[in-house]
Image: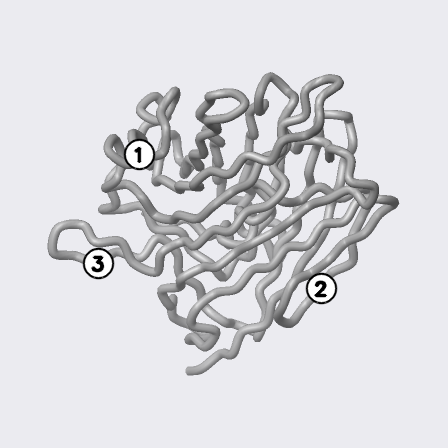
Amino acid sequence: MRRYVWLLLGLGALVAVTAVGIAAAAGGDGPVTVRVGGLELTTDVGFRPKTGSKTKQTPLAIDMSGEVREADGSHPPAARELVIEADKNGQIHTKGIPVCRSGRLQATDSAAALRACKAALIGKGNVVAQVAFAEQKPIDVKSKLLLFNGGERGGKTVWYAHAYLSNPVSAAIVTTVTITKVHRGRFGTESLVKIPQIAGGSGSGISYELEIFKFVKVGDKRLNPISGRCADGKVRFHLAAKFEDGTKAQTEVIRACTGTR
């Protein structure tokens, strides 16, 4: 079953978006930087190929990265919820791709998560979380970032992002992305990203890079998790974020594509 989505763009916000206020729409290529007060967010999204049919779906590989920082070097607030309205010209494909359940990822390191759900893996990368306990200097902790297909439930598509912190605390961070079809002009889906607390609320994601695969191999078949069509030369999405300290943010981004017949 197919669901319209440009989650490939919205997933970038899963770790990185931490801006206060409203950022203007941005198009073209290259990183987009938002500065509000002392907070600075840089995020980048790309897809391959950039040329695709105006009317037919083209399988895509997705590359994303992002970083958030405070100008004074202090610990940034943690994002807890993201709502992503995504371009109706994209599709996400779950049919035929094996499914991983959240319970198989809880309390597992990256190697164990792969052993449990490797067949459902649709993307991978790296993430850096910053842990700041009271009266201690913040510590940056690196982890692999793994993205798994969670299947469909009640007409909604679910994906899981897994990271594992080993120091100064040992914890698996499993983020759930729930995708629902909507009809809101240019937007065709609403994706709700619920981000659990890191280190009991003392941690924040500060940078990431992620590739969503163009194809995954299932038996003798090659299935594509994400595809899109370039109907009018652009791809658009809107993001709203809520943070641990009550801060709210929203931004809209437009990326260019080249349409063919």
Residue that label 3 marks: 222
Q: CA distance from mark 2 to mark 1?
A: 38 Å
Q: Nearer the viewer, mark 2 or mark 1?
A: 1
- Please give left or right for residue 237 compared with residue 211 in the image: right
> Element under label 3?
strand
Residue that label 2 marks: 26
**Of 91 and 25, which appears nearest the observer?**
25
Q: Nearer the viewer, mark 3 or mark 1?
A: 1
**Residue 13 to residue 6: above or below:** above
Picture coordinates of residue 116, whole percent (x, y):
25, 30
**Residue 116 to residue 28: above or below:** above
Picture coordinates of residue 105, whole percent (x, y):
35, 26
Marker disc for residue 111: 1
Q: How many marks?
A: 3
> Element under label 2?
strand
**Residue 255 to residue 20: above or below:** below
Colour scheme in use: one colour
- Please give left or right for residue 27 compared with residue 8 in the image: right
